[in-house]
Image (cartoon, rainbow, N blue to C red):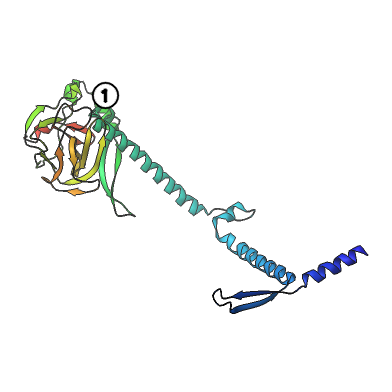
Amino acid sequence: MKSSRLKEFLTKKMRNRYRLIIRNDRNLAERVSIILTPLNVVLLFSGLLVVFTAISIYLLPLTPLRYLMPGGGEINPRHFKVMKQRLDSIERVMYLREQRDSNLYRILRGEDSTDTAAKTSYYFEPVEKLESGSFSWIASARASSGESKAHKTSKAPRSQERELRLSGNYAFFTPLKGIVTDTFDLRRNHPAVDVVSYNNAAVKATLDGTVILSSWTPETGHVMLLQHTDNIISVYKHNSVLLKKQGAQVQAGEVIALMGNSGELTTGPHLHFELWQNGRAVNPLDYIKF
């Protein structure tokens, strides 16, 4: 008896009619009038749920989520091979960038990399950014097992091993006209030439190239690195102002900075100029007249 009454009560409630009216807020004019019952609302939402579920089931096999479903399919061996090649390429690029950062750190610290070059020689190569179009650069590594063997068997004094020359003839532009106050000497860990000139003198690019670093460090102050052809890098430290940003193309003789006295390692206003090729420091006085 109670169950029949409850059923009759629910049936009556589900069939109660309600009117949904939408009016204009300004003049209260009736715009939409819809008659609803609880039963119609339940049926409407049930239908929408069924449609949404059917669409999801249809689209799910077209997404990578199908691999998480039982019997959803297996990875195509060809696709797996392509993904593996891409992963190997990413690992290779990460390795080369680590070598680039290590080599840059030695250059900024003024350390010679002859010892590590016996195992691997590093050089910097400008590369056009594929997607953004902005200039970027990576460091590449070349195995040099033959060079390593020659290094081990050579009995020449260490000072002679470090006497390096540029491989090629280049017309260098003098970065700063002035007085040389300190010369190139690897025994003192000074792979550079220090040049003094008048206050805020213009510092110029020694060769055509690209700015690969334009930044500030606590030790060297405002520092700039230029990438040139044949893996040559020129370094300009202790500047007061940097006039070029990273990625900028510069011409030989173009002003790139102003001489200064920035950084903890400076002893007064001067330009600390370094010249590197293949990750090894060379004596700028052998090629440039200051």
Q: Nearer the viewer, residue 179 or 70?
A: 179
Q: Nearer the viewer, residue 44 or 233?
A: 44
Q: Residues within 10 Å of mark 1 (few under 14, many from 20)?
A: few
Q: Nearer the viewer, residue 137 or 120?
A: 137
> To which quarter of the image does residue 212 belong?
top left
Q: Amino acid at mark 1?
A: Lys
Task: Check the image and report above or below for 49 versus 200.
Answer: below
> Element type at marker 1?
helix
Residue 281 at x, y percent in the picture: 19, 31
Q: How many marks?
A: 1
The reply, left or right, for residue 65 in relation to residue 274 is right
Residue at 30 percent across and 55 percent down: it is: 133
Task: Check the image and report above or below for 231 versus 114.
Answer: below
Residue 288 at x, y percent in the picture: 8, 36
Identify the image quadrant of the N terminus. Answer: bottom right
Q: Which residue is mark 1?
A: 152
Q: Nearer the viewer, residue 81 or 236?
A: 236
Task: Check the image and report above or below for 61 versus 84.
Answer: below
> To which quarter of the image does residue 182 belong?
top left
Give the farthest residue toward the front.
27
The reply, left or right, for residue 32 in relation to residue 46 is left
Residue 152 at x, y percent in the picture: 26, 24
Identify the image quadrant of the C terminus. Answer: top left
Residue at 32 percent across and 54 percent down: it is: 132
Residue 191 at x, y percent in the picture: 18, 28
> To which quarter of the image does residue 28 belong?
bottom right
